[in-house]
Amino acid sequence: MPKNSKVVKRELDDEVIESVKDLLSNEDSSDDAFKKSELMVDDQEEKDVDVEEGSDVEDERPAWNSKLQYILAQVGFSVGLGNVWRFPYLCQKNGGGAYLVPYLILLLIIGIPLFFLELAVGQRIRRGSIGVWNYISPKLGGIGFASCVVCFFVALYYNVIIGWSLFYFSQSFQHPLPWDQCPLVKNTSHTFVEPECEKSSATTYYWYREALNISSSLSESGGLNWKMTICLLAAWVMVCLAMIKGIQSSGKIMYFSSLFPYVVLLCFLIRGLLLNGSVDGIRHMFTPKLEIMLEPKVWREAATQVFFALGLGFGGVIAFSSYNKRDNNCHFDAVLVSFINFFTSVLATLVVFAVLGFKANIINEKCVIQNSEKILKLLKIGNLSQDMIPHHINFSSITAEDYNLVYDIIQKVKEEEFDSLGLKSCQIEDELNKAVQGTGLAFIAFTEAMTHFPASPFWSVMFFLMLVNLGLGSMFGTIEGIITPIVDTFKVRKEILTVICCLVAFFIGLIFVQRSGNYFVTMFDDYSATLPLLIVVILENIAVTRIYGIDKFMEDLKDMLGFSPSQYYYYMWKYVSPLVLLCLLVASIVQMGLSPPGYSAWIEDTAMEEFHSYPTWGMIVCISLMVLAILPVPIVFMVRRCNLIDDSSGSLASVSYKRGRIIKEPVNLEGDNTSLIHGKSPSEVPSPNFGKNIYRKQTGSPTLDTAPNGRYGIGYLMADMPDMPESDL
């Protein structure tokens, strides 16, 4: 320390807790040599800048160009394919409009509070998922690794769906659309319709045979589907190019990928409302079935949808928020993004059922025509009497209402022999009650409806371009949940890591573009994420509320936001959300145990789906996916608990001191009371004990040991003070 510095001596039993900033305030500004000195830690792991509020040091961590860009990134990540093809199905299946009640309740109980928690933690600590939970407690570092593993598993098959969408997008630039009619097969004698297509439908045949060229079982790989392999490669190239510069590159793409789906959904809604039967679909959708709402299964599925719709536990939310300023109002962001997600789901549901109502109306009209012809034949051969038919009925232009009137009369008069007549009721509700979700909705039901649109190629191009953008927005967040924590922890170059990650994922993803690849997509979707993510989020909640301390966390939020968050969050985080999550975990395990593990295989001869149980090796893969995803949690805990790796406390911090400025905070040490979100003043924080020495190197001066005191683990520099005993400091 320079000779003209003032030193305050205290009693021998007093602790020195003055920080580096306090030390600098006593330095003589004319001591240029000291200002050019450099302070280093032996084991420097972190290089990002993590500066206290009010410091004049610029943060080296990348940042969003604007608040809008950040919101669009979070919306793009949370709003994905599930909003379009999962939420409408759940809404229809679980009571129509009544399903919105449990969904909204659970959104308020677990959705917004846990989303707010991840945003707040990521924003203040400014690290990815691994660094965040290491900061709270090194023993919980496995939570971040588990999130990365789940993100990787999900990215593997999610990008395959983008590849499927790219294939359909590329095939939409032709009229008529290739899935509009069944193909004809020619032989030497005559031409006939493809039998597999005739037994199913044109869109079903195109999906299973032309697009996937699917095999009849999981065990029958059938080799690579080269069309889908090229599409998968294109999808990974798009993701790699968008992510290679981190948020600097992906953030700009968000303006298009996040906003374009809303343009398409609004266009589809307007067009759909002008179609015949669309109102029937929307009315059917939102007619509440209150009795179904009381079933436990409805609440379980609503909770699961809330959980996955917001992307909780993936690490993408934490990664995106880590690039924010510390004083950003993340509470507002949490509420805004959550409700944008909800209203997007409702908008997509309106679109889906307007279009499905139109499709059901067309199918119902065909049903009426076919069955009217049957009635005319029965009248001619004398099986039915003309006296049954009301005089105003004209079979050449019969309406659905008139047909149903005739149907009811025949059913009452010919009650005993009615079944042998082979007549169908032709109710539009029966068609709408056929619940479809996932690929069945996007690539079969919706594509079939679009073939009846005027200018159908245009709407097909728009629809599949929307699916590509929805998928890319979610993929950006998923990949960010892998890249950011690894870059923060291991200090590798983001560009190199992104390219390696995408290459590895592409080559592993080749299993999904075999002829049996669709069955592997189903397997990964069912088993790789559900249980591991629930466990991860439960541990996140426990880490903040129990290990770190909910009271301290609330104080930190007050300091960061500038106001005290509602006590509602206190009770949700501490009591309600963990309990609901535990119930959801138990219910998911029970449901998984009760449901026979298997998949729906497409049988070419019958042109129908058939349920198959997983073979033994398939069950091993399913169990391995769940175990591998959650395995990092106990491994890291045991390694840290038993000190299996030599990791002294000094290596947990990384401090750089250059030109008299602090440009690094230490990672929180276990047992250190340093505040997680709120940087306490130096006088409030006890001093961590570092196992390694810290040195100041200065030209012309010897390297000197320092006392292991001070908030930053730096303590007082002992230069030029050989006569002062350490105890005096």
Image: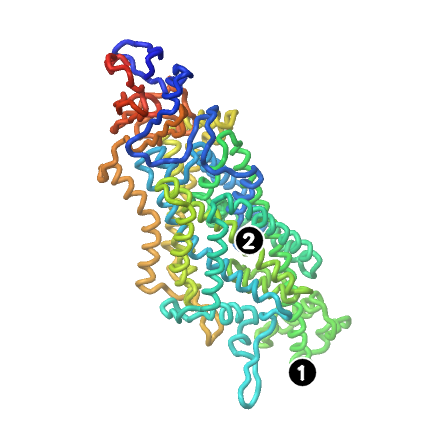
Question: Badge 2 is on which residue?
Answer: 469
Q: Nearer the viewer, residue 270 or 613?
A: 270
Say whether disc 1 or disc 2 marks the residue closer to the N-terminus: 1
Where in the figure is residue 249, as x and y percent of width and height? 51, 46
The residue at the point 47 percent across, 30 percent down is 58
At label 2, which amino acid type do we have? Answer: Asn
- Where is residue 251? Give x, y as percent: 53, 44
Quarter of the image for the N terminus: give it.
top left
Tag 1 secondary structure: loop
- Please give the name of the residue rendered at 51% of the width and 52% of the height, measured from the top-left corner: 472
Where is residue 91? Give x, y as percent. Answer: 55, 51
Q: Which residue appears farthest toward the right when viewing the image? A: 392
Looking at the image, the residue that sits furthest to the bottom is: 189
Q: Which residue is mark 1?
A: 382
Q: Is residue 476 left or right of residue 486?
A: right
Eyeballing the image, is 581 above or below 239? above
Residue 20, visible in the rendered structure? no
Front tag of 1 and 2: 2
In the displayed structure, does residue 419 sit left or right of residue 523?
right
Amino acid carrying label 1: it is: Gly
